[in-house]
Amino acid sequence: MSFDIIELIKYILSGLIQGVTEVLPVSSSGHVELSKALLGLKTDDNTFFLIFLNAGSLATFIIIYFKRLLRYVKAFFNFVFYPSKREENKQDTVFLMKILVACIPAGIAGILIKDYLDEMLDANGLLIAGIGLLVTATVIYYVSSSKFRNGKTQVTWPDVLFVGLAQAVAIFPGISRSGMTTSTALKRGSGIVSALDFSFLMYIFISLGTVLLGVYDLTQATVSISNPQLIYYGGAFVAAMGATYIAYRIIFNVFKSGKLKYFSYYCFAAGILSIILFMM
């Protein structure tokens, strides 16, 4: 395969789409499938391409939440190794444990159905993404009528269970991870800011596990990725990283304002478009 600047632009556009949609409750995976169809994008391996894109958004969220992550990790080690400091570090340690526990259902689901999901994506990616987007639209619309701006700021252990299960459902393309987890937290009584923070912190840990597992699979894979393809993937990674940051700083305010019904309308339209393209 020879290098093609047009192909690189297509990959960069996919990265930009990934970055923006990762922040918003509209399913980044569903939009990547849709963008691949619209752009005529061909990848050497769909799974590895998604990992590259996801890694770009993950890097940005680690940067955004770095100080908080460092605080939680320090609190955990102080709690475990310094008994005299346990009381002052208990709250942050418990919160970190809640995040990790909430990631378990999605981790188990991913391991159990990963191969099956990859096969479905290769055969019917657009159809699955379209159905998932319709599910996302329905869930967000259901939640949009709720009054949640001044909800509780603490995440309880029952909340952790329900939000974790919601994240597990969102492993299917088209079903928005942030949409499902945030909607569940809101219905459990959390305020919009608390729900979003918990959702994005969960994303960091579950995505870190996914990326590491993907890197391991890549080292064990017999599939070879050409040098031009690596350049394309790199361009997509950088684009996803930059777009995620811009979306979080600018577009994210619309999400935080509580105007969820507009995202529902958008997901419904995108889902219908995906299904139509699949049928064509």
Image (cartoon, rainbow, N blue to C red):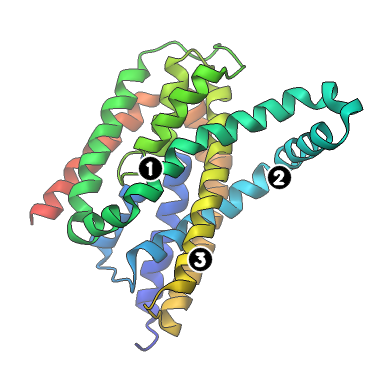
**How far apart are the alpha carbons under marks 3 and 1?**
18 Å
Kindly state the secondary structure of the residue where label 1 is placed.
helix
Kindly state the secondary structure of the residue where label 2 is placed.
helix
**How far apart are the alpha carbons under marks 2 and 1?**
27 Å
Name the residue nearer the viewer: 227 or 77.
77
22 vs 3: above or below:
above
Residue 238: horizontal and vertical position, in percent? 54, 64
Binning the other alpha carbons within 10 Å of mark 1 as few (below 14), some (14 to 19) or many (20 upward) gives some
Residue 138: horizontal and vertical position, in percent? 26, 27
Do the residues under discs 3 and 1 have CB atoms within 8 angstroms?
no
> Residue tagged by mark 2?
66
Kindly state the secondary structure of the residue where label 3 is placed.
helix
Residue extending furthest bottom?
Answer: 2
> Residue tagged by mark 1?
109
45 vs 159: above or below:
below
Q: In which quadrant of the rendered image does the N terminus lie?
A: bottom left
> Residue tagged by mark 3?
216
Q: Amino acid type of disc 1? A: Ala
For marks 3 and 1 on the same chain, the one whose residue lies earlier in the sequence: 1
Q: In which quadrant of the rendered image does the C terminus lie?
A: bottom left
